Every structure is written in C-alpha cells, then in structure tokens.
Amino acid sequence: AKAPGPGVYRYMLGELQLTALYDGTWYLPIDDKFVRNANGATVNAALAAAFLPPSVLPITFTALLVNNGRKLTLIDTGTAGQITDTAGFMNANLNAAGVQPADIDTIVISHFHPDHIDGIKTKDGDKVFANAEILVPEPEWKFWMDDGNMSRATGAVHKYFLNARRIFKDIAEQVRPLKPGAEVAPGIVSLAAYGHTPGHTAFAIHSGNRSMLAMSDTVRNPYLFVRHPDWQPIFDMDGPLAVKARRQMLDRVVADRMLVEAY
C-alpha cells in the first residue's frame, strides 16, 4: 500500500516500517468506582479537560505491525468484533495496508485480556494467522493457564480465564512463551510492565538512532493516566504495581526521548 487509509497510519522508525492498525473504539460507561483512588467527580473533570463527555471512557484498540524488510511482526491482534459492535476492523485495515493475515510471520502478545488476543481466532474459532508463530509473556501464560488460579477467579476475570483457553488450548504447540527482557524480533525488545495483569509486557522498538516504546496497556488512556499516573483503574489487576510500572515507563521515555505508542 502506498498511502494510508482512515484506519492505517504508516511511518518509519529508522529502517523499520511501522503500521498502526485501528481496530475500533469501545465507549465504556464508567461509574464512581472506575478509579479506585479517585472519585467520579475528579475523573469526570479530567475527562472534561480532554474535551470528552462525562462518565464514558472511549477505549481505542490499535495493533502495531513491524516490518523489518524480511519479516512481519504483529503486536497484539484486536478484538475480532467479539467485544463491541464499534470494534473489529483490524483485519480490514490490515488488508488496506496491503498485508494478508497469512503474510504475518510472528504475533507478539502483550497480555491475555480479550481485546489483545481475540483476533487470533474468528468468532467461529478458526485460526486467522495461518503461518504465524505466537509469542506470549511466560508469566502471563503461567497465570492464565493455571487451573487453580481459574478456580479462584470470579466475575469478568473468570471469563478472561475461559477466553484464554478458548483462544490457546488447541494451538498451544504454536505458542512460545518468552521471558520479558528478551528480544522478540530484530529491533523489538520485550519489557516487564506488570500490574495491569500479572505478566503484562511492553515493547521497546529501536532502529538506528530512533526508538519508541510500545506501552501496551501501561497507560490505558493518556488523558487520564499520563496526567494522573498514580490513579488506579479497576482494569489494573494490581493497582500499586501498575502505578510503579507506569511511572517507570514514563520516566524512561522522558529520559531517553523516545516516541510512544499505546494500544
């Protein structure tokens, strides 16, 4: 593809070609309990400061495709339309970018929340990326695939356990756990960013003298959690640990003058 489309943003980072692929936006109603350590009025004031309506959090889903000239690496896979009717467009945008799912060599997963892994399969359970090796954070795999952990989970978290098994159970032989800190592809290094989930992982991308931090869900919504990094949304399974990771990541990008990208 020579030109971007409305859901495709392509740019160069040194010698790497990066393509952001928009999957959609979930307009999530939120209440006073959404941020554990800030009341609803304060959160709504922050939304208003970002020109957003109150009590609704727009959550965007954006996968990132990295082309090093030899291989295509996709970081996270979108929702496959399985979370909200206003998302599920990643594969259409991948096609608009001139890439077919079978062209993807490697899929790297940041964590096992449904909006990051559901795109691995269709709603009917068919595998989407026929030729891709799938890399997942080792601590994330251990947590979500543990039957004891699943037996103690309740509510939405229990559904996440069931969903992880739906996605991975019959393709486990194609999944390779990685230890955060390892290079997952040339120029892409995984970084532990625990707290949002037990094995949540971000990715530093380098080429020449350019660098970018793909933060995954470390900062889920910048207008709230960059401006207020100590806030703990209910999405973060371990709030204090997520705050620590968030501050470390933000300090790093400031010190190293990195570009940032988030899901």
Image (tube, helix red, strand yellow):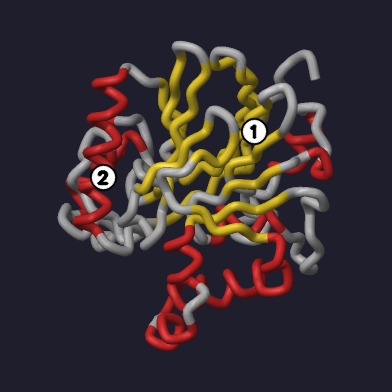
Q: Residues within 10 Å of mark 2 (few under 14, many from 20)?
A: many
Q: Secondary structure at mark 1?
A: strand
Query: Is the N terminus in the top left, top right, bottom left or bottom right quadrant?
Result: top right
The residue at 67%/30% (across/down) is 7
Residue nearest the observer in this picture, 174 or 91: 174
The residue at 75%/35% (across/down) is 94
> At label 1, which amino acid type do we have?
Leu
The residue at 56%/51% (across/down) is 109
Q: Is residue 214 left or right of residue 230?
A: right
Q: Is residue 29 above or below residue 248?
A: below
The residue at 51%/61% (across/down) is 112
Residue bearing the label numbered 1: 65
Tag 1 and tag 2, C-beta contact below 8 Å:
no
The quadrant where residue 48 appears: top left
Q: Is residue 4 above or below residue 176?
A: above
Of the two numbered discs 1 and 2 on the same chain, state the one appearing first in sequence.
Answer: 2
Q: Position of residue 228 (x, y in %)?
A: 21, 39
Q: Is residue 58 left or right of residue 63?
A: left
Q: Is residue 94 left or right of residue 112?
A: right
Which numbered marker is on residue 44? 2
Q: Position of residue 182 (x, y in %)?
A: 47, 43
Q: Is residue 117 visible?
A: yes
Mark 1–mark 2 Cα distance, whole angstroms, equals 34 Å
